[in-house]
Amino acid sequence: MSKSIARAASLALGAVAGIAMTVSAEGQTSKAAAGPAATPTFSKDVEPIFYKNCTNCHRPGEIAPMSLLTYKDARPWAKSIATQVGKGAMPPWHADPKHGQFLNDRRLSDADKATLVAWGNGGAPEGKPSDLPAAPTYDGGWTIGTPDQVFAMSEDYPIPASGEIPYQFLEIETKLSQACVPLVARALPRLLAGELTFASQDETQVSFCRRLSKEDGTLDFNVSAAELAARINGLYPWPGCAFDLADTRVKVGMSEAEVGTENASGDKPGETLGSDGASLRVATGHGVLRLLRLQRPSGKMLDAPEFLRGFTIAPGTLIASQPMTRLVGKEPL
Ligand code: HEC
């Protein structure tokens, strides 16, 4: 008996707060939850996390669909919060942690994540309003520090006061070298001061690319829409991809693989499938390719609908494929 009590005592010391150890008459140990104290409360545990990680987006006038600034705002979303946070969809963060640290990393710590999930799934109690921390102040506008570089658009894009705008592709023409010089200039002094640590490059991940030439802009519609889109977008603005329709060379400025058609078959690769209001759809070896920006010789690069108003391409027109050159490989090309 004395042995099992000693064991129970050390277990109790090791157990997390809120779980009490009891010893039954038979000397058996058993766990019992210590009641509601086990569930985090909004005021004490949850709102500080919202202030830190969520309300920059989840407040009136910001991008997210609901505010998380008060208990009343947040309570109806408790279940959804547990789900979205549990599966890592919120806060949104798409950078791969494999590739180093990011100054504005938005991910939650495991402890904060567990707190939000336990609260959302545990009846979402409010707790004592007196536990609430001071609310952050927001003065509107840019919130992520001084930018390294600001690139201006060459043309204004007017935004109507209400209504919906279809997804836009606004091009900002900047040479990567110009964008990078200030970053290098900023990093060099830190490098000399020994503040930066080097990680060696994983040679097995290297791929080789040869010098691009004017002849690289051909399109073979027998390959997949995803591969074609990568080629078209990657080679824009130079050398630029193009195809020939009768006597006209049509340049393509931007495209994407249509979601959900990856395995579409039946149409002949290169066959045009008409316009969907935002793009010219073309059948490929795997899936449908959406051509979003097109240009005629001596014309301007235009959004597909505008282009098609001045240049008719009837559905069922076949665009001839041209072999595509290999650009990238695991060995030097
Ligand atoms: C960078 C901005 C941003 C941050 C930070 C952010 N969210 Fe969101 N959140 C959004 C947007 C935008 C949506 C709407 C997504 C959509 O409709 O596809 C959303 C949607 C949600 C939803 C789904 C609502 C529904 O319709 O069911 C939940 C829940 C949610 N966020 C919780 C959180 C929580 C909790 C945090 C902090 C831990 C957080 N979000 C941080 C931008 C953000």
Image: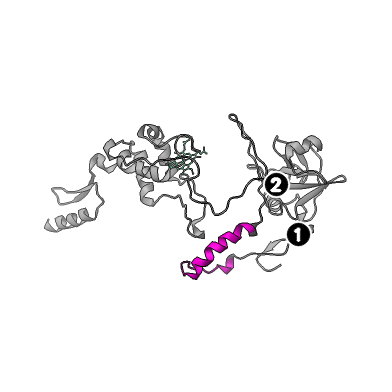
Which residues fall within the magenta stretch? Answer: 178-204
User: Is residue 117 inside the magenta stretch?
Assistant: no
Kind of residue at badge 1: Thr
Of labels 2 and 1, the one closer to you = 2
Residue situated in front as seen by the camera: 47 or 188 = 188
Residue situated in front as seen by the camera: 133 or 142 = 142
Q: Which residue bears the numbered disc 2?
A: 254
Name the residue at the left extreme: 2
Q: Position of residue 331 (x, y in %)?
A: 67, 68
The residue depicted at 50 percent of the width and 70 percent of the height is 192
Asked which secondary structure carries label 2, the reply is: strand
What crowding class fits label 1: few (fewer than 14 Cα within 10 Å), some (14-19), or many (20 or more)?
A: few
Mark 1 Cβ and ligand 1 under 8 Å apart: no
The residue depicted at 57 percent of the width and 63 percent of the height is 184
Q: Is residue 232 left or right of residue 132?
A: right
User: Is residue 183 inside the magenta stretch?
Assistant: yes
Residue situated in front as seen by the camera: 123 or 187 = 187
User: Can see residue 43?
Assistant: yes
Residue 160: image quadrant is top right
Specify the label residue 325 is tagged with: 1
Mark 2 Cβ and ligand 1 under 8 Å apart: no
